[in-house]
Image (spheres, helix red, strand yellow):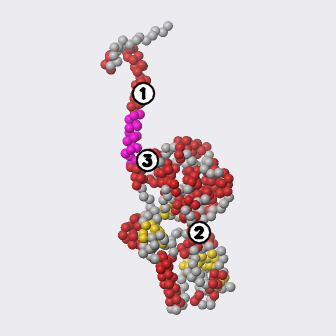
Amino acid sequence: MAAKPPGSRLKSYTPQAIVSAPPNERKHILRRFWFPAVILLALAAGGLTGIIAAYQLNYSQAASEVAALATYRPSVVTRIYADDGQTVIGEFALEKRIPLKYEEIPANMKNAILAVEDARFYDHIGIDPIRIVGATWKNLTSDKVEGGSTLTQQLAKNLFLTREQTLKRKMNEWLLALQIERYYTKNQIMELYANHIFLGANAYGVEAGAETYFGKQAKDLTLEEAALLAGIPKAPSEYSPTANPAKAKERRDLILDLMARTGFANQSDVDAAKAKPIQLADSAYYQAPQALSPAFDYPVEYIRQDLEDKYTTRVAQTGLAVYSTINVAAQKKAYEVVRSGLRRYDKGHGGWRSSYEAIPSSANNGAPTAQELASFKYPDWYRNDYVPGRYLRGLVMKVDQGRNEATVRFGNYTATVTAADTGWVGASARPVLNSNRAIWLSSKSKRLIRKLII
């Protein structure tokens, strides 16, 4: 039988007693106490690491930046009001943004965002290990590239970081996401994201996006419209519904499918939404003017310049409410009277003086292509809102020299203009109508209105 190890003869386990013990007994003592010692060291190291990590979380630069979000005031629209204090006559902004509270964001908009960005948003702490593992596996086993970022990480990237693809930036993104989750509730994070995302056409946030593309408030968005907006932030220029309608529809339909797959929408509703074409407001194709009517162009521009002189551009265009003394009815009447008088004066002094403007073209010979002619937008055509008696710019699409007439487009309308429609020019339209140029038209011409074609 193997001999049992001798029992310890030490009366105490002081360091001095252990060192002076015989070698065999010293080994026995060390074998008995090595595991508890390792555990104690590990606990000490873990505690120290926790203390350092807690210090970093509470006092790092990331913590300071995230805490400052509580007082964050993003750039929003400055509005100019008429003398009644209610009628908006103009608005301008560095970033067109109309903030919404979480409760004001419609459910279908929230669901579309969650479906495409982060279906497990309410189940993680800012970083989602399950999604990271899933995205990594998919990237390794397929040709598709999928990101593992959460909605909180997307917000951190949009607010604080650049788009560079480096490990250091990713680590900072994780740290910021954890900090955001520590300081804010999930609903607050969703509110920040929905108000901050860039949707193209200088529109920031879902409310500005709804107004820009659909001419309505976010609360009135349909399922397919909400899905369209949710798909734009990934690449605003690539998925722009005005510049790339085919890609925008493909992206929209993908998000609708994701909504059905993740339980955010019924399959029947998704199928019905996918069957609908993209229908945008006419205003989506134009850069919105500062003044909401040509009659207010000059007073609104004067007010803008005065504000910038007094308060700087950044202050003047970041969400002020400016109450002016402009009377709407009087301003519109003055505008029409002055313009009418100027044209009467012009007719009686020297006859016609041409006012042509060649539209820009990328062609070497300077002649616009058919696509450039079809896509050209003039500010006067905004919303296709035409008032009888108003002069506006028209684009000459083509000239028929044999019939002495031209096809002119303004907005969504085209008209055939003959010599009889050329006002005080004279009997011939040939000197007046040149292809691919913008000219002035008057909606007073009954003959022109009769030939209006939608």
Name the one closer to the observer, 273 or 179. Answer: 273
Height in image: 36 above or below 283? above
Residue 366 magenta-drawn?
no
Q: Amino acid at mark 3?
A: Tyr
Bin the neighbour count of mark 1 within 10 Å (Cα to Cα): few under 14, some 14-19, many 20 and up. few
| Image depth: mark 3 or mark 1 in front | 3
Q: Is residue 281 visible?
A: yes
x then y, percent, for residue 29: 39, 17
Q: Secondary structure at mark 2?
A: helix
Quarter of the image with the C terminus is bottom right
Residue bearing mark 1: 39
**Distance between the alpha carbons at the discs numbered 3 and 1:** 34 Å
Q: In this rendering, which labeled residue sits more in front, label 3 or label 2?
A: 3
Point out the frontmost of discs 1 and 2: 2
Which quadrant of the view contains residue 286? Answer: bottom right
Q: Position of residue 338 (x, y in %)?
A: 48, 84
- Could you give the CA–CA distance between mark 1 and mark 2, rounded to whole angstroms? 71 Å
- Residue at the spot 65% in from the left edge and 57% down from the top edge: 273
Circle 1 — which element? helix
Nearer the observer, 257 or 200? 257
Q: Which residues are magenta?
A: 46-63
Q: Residue 133, position in %: x, y?
A: 55, 42
Q: Which residue is mark 2?
A: 282
The amino acid at mark 2 is Asp
Residue 406 to residue 316: above or below? below
Would residue 325 be found to the left or right of residue 439 on screen?
left
The mark nearer the N terminus, 3 or 1, is 1
Foreground pick, 439 / 107: 107
Q: Name the residue: 35% across, 14% down.
A: 10
Q: Secondary structure at mark 3?
A: helix
Residue at the disc numbered 3:
183
Q: Is residue 163 visible?
A: no
